[in-house]
Amino acid sequence: MYLGAFIFLIGLCVGSFLNVVIFRTRNERSIVRGRSRCTVCQIELRPAELVPVLSFLFLRGRCRMCASKISVQYPLVEFVTGSLFLLFFLRYTQGFALQDYINSSNIGIAFLRDIVFVAFLMIVFVYDLRYVEILDRFTVPAMGFALVMNLLLGVDAESLLLGASVLGGFFLVQYTISKGRWVGGGDIRMGLLMGLMLGLRDGLMALFIAYLIGALFGLVLIVSKRANWKTAIPFGTFLSIATLIVLLFGKPMLYWYLGLFM
Ligand SMILES: [Zn+2]
């Protein structure tokens, strides 16, 4: 119980750090050096204004100096990261939806793997949603991490490499046919990453779910007349959500799906 609350707080702080990484990457500033500032009046934030979620609430979403609005993205990213950390923690302590390769001897490694996955996927999610770009500086290190951790956990190496080839290849083919107009190079690397994170079977499931979410999202935008058929869709955002869903609920979802035919 206390440990769960602690993990949630750690997640909030990691979320806060992810905001810094995203903002400073976009603005080409050092991630470790320099204090955070108001993006409008440039006043340095006080330590008390760096507390995840709470600072935003106390400041009522406005800068103390110039009163300009603070993006709701900051507390949202913190809260969602904290919640995902807690969800993965509960999954291991309550033992729900665990994949076959996870057992009592490697739960620690699996949990560490999952929260680092959450951090990388949150960055891809937010960055692609805001700037419609999937950066290699996030997906490439994540690939190495995913491969090492999954091999440590005893995930089938063949499934990981096949998953990376098939998912990466899927985007590579579209990239080649459309000469880079349908998907970007970042999508190819994201496909490789999903294969290395999930393996072939779960990777394909995530790809399918991403298209389902993307189609629903696109329809809602078109029906509400906020977009047309040519609007650029941040597909990395849907790929990230789908990867998280399959990481958490892949096994029960697969059993449910197979149950439909038996
Ligand atoms: Zn300000």
Image: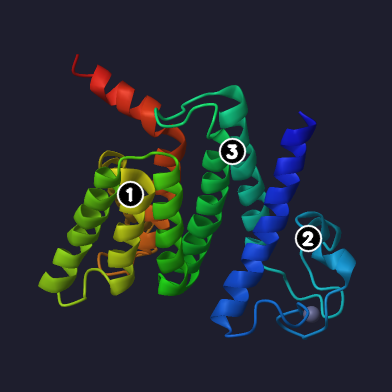
In front: mark 1 or mark 2?
Answer: 1
Which is nearer the N-term, disc 3 or disc 2? Answer: 2
For residue 98, above or below residue 166 = above
For badge 1, the amino acid type reads Ala
Q: In terms of image quadrants, where is residue 134?
A: bottom left
> For this rendering, which residue is in front, 99 or 222?
99
For badge 3, the amino acid type reads Gly
Q: Residue at x 15, y 77 (%)?
A: 179
In three-dimensional space, the C-alpha distance between marks 3 and 2, rounded to whole angstroms, equals 33 Å
Q: In terms of image quadrants, where is residue 236?
A: bottom left
Q: Where does residue 250 sit, x and y in percent of width and height?
A: 38, 34
Indicate left or right for 65 with 92 as reference. right
In three-dimensional space, the C-alpha distance between marks 1 and 3, rounded to whole angstroms, equals 29 Å
Indicate left or right for 130 with 42 as reference. left
Q: Residue at x 46, y 57 (%)?
A: 145
Badge 1 residue CB within 8 Å of ligand 1: no
For badge 2, the amino acid type reads Phe
Q: Mark 1 sits on what residue? A: 210
Q: Mark 3 sits on what residue? A: 108
Q: Where does residue 119 sit, x and y in percent of width and height?
A: 56, 56
In front: mark 1 or mark 3?
Answer: 3
The quadrant of the picture occupied by the C terminus is: top left
Secondary-structure class at tag 3: helix
In three-dimensional space, the C-alpha distance between marks 1 and 2, rounded to whole angstroms, equals 31 Å
For residue 173, above or below residue 45 = above
Circles 1 and 3: CB atoms closer than 8 Å: no
Residue 257 appears in the rendering? yes
> For this rendering, which residue is in front, 90 or 260?
90
Indicate left or right for 98 with 205 as reference. right
Secondary-structure class at tag 2: helix
Answer few, some or many: residues within 10 Å of disc 1's Cα (few below 14, many 20 plus, some between 14 and 19): many
Q: Mark 2 sits on what residue? A: 56
